[in-house]
Image (cartoon, rainbow, N blue to C red):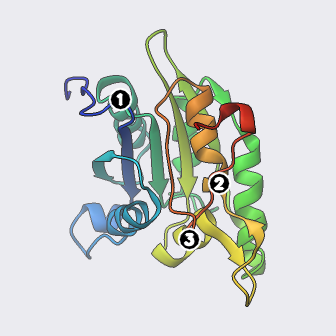
Amino acid sequence: MSPKQQRSHPDELLVGLVSISDRASAGVYADLGLPGLREWLARALRSPWRAFERLVADVPSAIEGALLELVDQCGCDLVLTTGGTGPARRDVTPEATRAVATREMPGFGEQMRRISLEFVPTAILSRQVGVLRETPEHSALILNLPGQPKAIAQTLEGLRDAQGKIVVPGIFAAVPYCIQLIGGPYMETDPDVVVAYRPKAAQRT
């Protein structure tokens, strides 16, 4: 297990990135999930952040172990997973995520499917969930994302019209305030990628 990390800055976000794939974890082909998550965060975040990455097979114990290590040992505030959320028998990410959760955040899964339905009718087959894992010392938000980098970006950013106006909000617009509410750092985003929403009372001047 990794020792619990110390922040290099009070506002540094510790984020866990987990790609779930039998074949990528076995080296059959290159993993695209972790690079996709990393590249999107690099574009979206203006405040400091540090990532801890895991590539695991579609096995409940492996997924649960990665999530527990990232939250309980590494101290991650946010964990983003990619892959394993469909209806196939090997798609067990939602079950593994719920197994380590203390509370569910159903709005995240609902909004992810709403965004994906703008592109494909098979979005109703997605079983992505958002949950909180809370211990006496620490709380974290865990979100299941799609498996493809393009779909990851669409889910996080939302959909814009031809003039660049958001028509369907992405889920990341709510993430900074959620992290703030559960005791995590103050996150700032690049508004050209995603605008973080907070009520005025929660905004820094």
- Between marks 1 and 2 in the image, the one whose residue lies nearer the viewer: 1
Q: Which mark is residue 192?
A: 3
The mark that comes first in sequence, 1 or 3, is 1
Q: Nearer the viewer, mark 2 or mark 3?
A: 3
For residue 42, which numbered disc appears in the image? none
State the SS at label 1.
loop
Q: Residue at x 48, y 9 (%)?
A: 136
Residue position for label 1? 10
Residue drawn 35% across the image and 34% down it: 70
Q: What residue is shown at x 23% (from left), y 63% (from top)?
A: 26
Q: Residues within 10 Å of mark 2 (few under 14, many from 20)?
A: many
Does 67 sit left or right of 173 as displayed? left
Q: Secondary structure at mark 2?
A: helix
Q: Position of residue 39 (x, y in %)?
A: 36, 68
* Residue position for label 2: 173
- Please rate how many residues cluster around mark 3, counting C-alpha atoms within 10 Å: few if below 14, some from 14 to 19, many from 20: few
